[in-house]
Image (cartoon, rainbow, N blue to C red):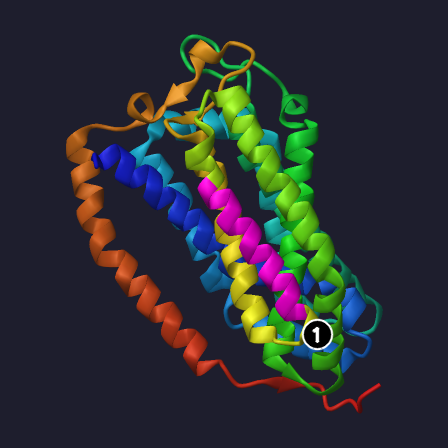
Amino acid sequence: MTLEILWFCLIAVLWSGYFVLEGFDFGVGILLPFLGREEEDRDAMLGAVEPVWDGNEVWLVIAAGATFAAFPAWYATMFSGLYLALALILVLLILRVLSFEWRGRGEGRWRGRWERANTVASVGAPFLWGIALSSLLWGLPLDGDGHFTGDVLDLFSPYTVLAGIATVALFALHGASFVALRTSGALRERAAHAARRLGLPVALVGCAFLAATVAVAVGNNERAALPVLVPALLGGAALVLAALFAARGASGRAFAMSALGAVGLVATLFCGLYPRVLVSRPDFANSLTVADAATAHYALSVITVVGAIMLPVILLYQGWTYHVLRVRLGSGAPPR
């Protein structure tokens, strides 16, 4: 395996980590108006993610940094073509940060407004991430030098919109299972009930997106079906199992399967994208490949050493953080 392929795979791993960890953060925000009937419930839901959400976003920072270091041409083309979408995502992420920080300082109406802001950002950011990442495979108009020549409307297609919907739905299920794991009492019961109701729709829309990704990879990227079909089938199986475990009230197993489902979505997308990092349409010959977008071999060697040292440190620290914060939270409200 060459260093170019290694870093392409590592970037896929980083995006998978971001979807798994930040996914339940977003899911909590999505479900905040539905599960948080009382102020104590909303305090418990946000209290479950407040100690970890900023650490989870480290995966996004590392993914962007790794793309810049390993594939500068991919980074430049992607950030120029997706500029407006990424700018809006940044605004939503900032709004979400402010909602965590300022909600506790407000009272009454202002407190409720920041809670609604958290929900809006938690729905909008995953939806746009799904559109942005899937557009890499669907295709964007590039010229012969790999420069983006379209506009923001080129990001939207039935496939990319499906990707956005699937991402939001999966994160909602992931968040419901997380709340059921991290809380107690009536809030836990409502979260488990929400997971049961979400399970089947999420499995259906997730499998639809995975099947569409295989078709788009074959049709738009000239990929053989089998390499893309394998992660798609595994991801689909994980989503179906997540729905079954949620229906049985096994929140821990449902959470694990929804996490694997998130990994399956990212893995299928990146498998469908390889050996390119950005597909060009309608001029497929202008597509940006892994080899063309990679930086010099020496630079790849240096960042490989740095990554080999730092990635285990990050994993150990986050694992320790979740171990320390494993105690359930509860609102104290009587069961309803």
Decide if residue 44 is on the left or right side of residue 214: right
Classify mark 1: helix, strand or loop: helix
Quadrant in which the C terminus is drawn: bottom right
Q: Nearer the viewer, residue 274 or 57?
A: 274
Q: Nearer the viewer, residue 240 or 3?
A: 240
Task: Tell me which segment is drawn in magenta.
Answer: 230-246
Magenta highlight: main SS: helix
Residue type highlighted by circle 1: Ala
Q: Residue at x 36, y 25 (%)?
A: 73
Residue 117 position within the rendered picture, expressed as x and y whole percent measured from the top left: 73, 57
Q: Is residue 273 above or below residue 102?
A: above
Residue 193 position within the rendered picture, expressed as x and y whole percent measured from the top left: 75, 73
* Label 1 packing within 10 angstroms: few (<14), some (14-19), many (20+): many
The number of callouts visible is 1
Residue 311 position within the rendered picture, expressed as x and y whole percent measured from the top left: 29, 57
Work out whether residue 98 can be spotted.
Answer: no
Q: Nearer the viewer, residue 170 or 60?
A: 170
Residue 90 position within the rendered picture, expressed as x and y whole percent measured from the top left: 58, 44
Q: Is residue 201 above or below residue 110?
A: above
Q: Is residue 65 magenta?
A: no
Q: Is residue 235 magenta?
A: yes
Q: Residue at x 65, y 66 (%)?
A: 244
Work out whether residue 285 can be spotted.
Answer: yes
Q: Is residue 112 above or below residue 157?
A: below
Quadrant in which the N terminus is drawn: top left
Q: Residue at x 57, y 60 (%)?
A: 258
Q: Which residue is mark 1?
A: 192
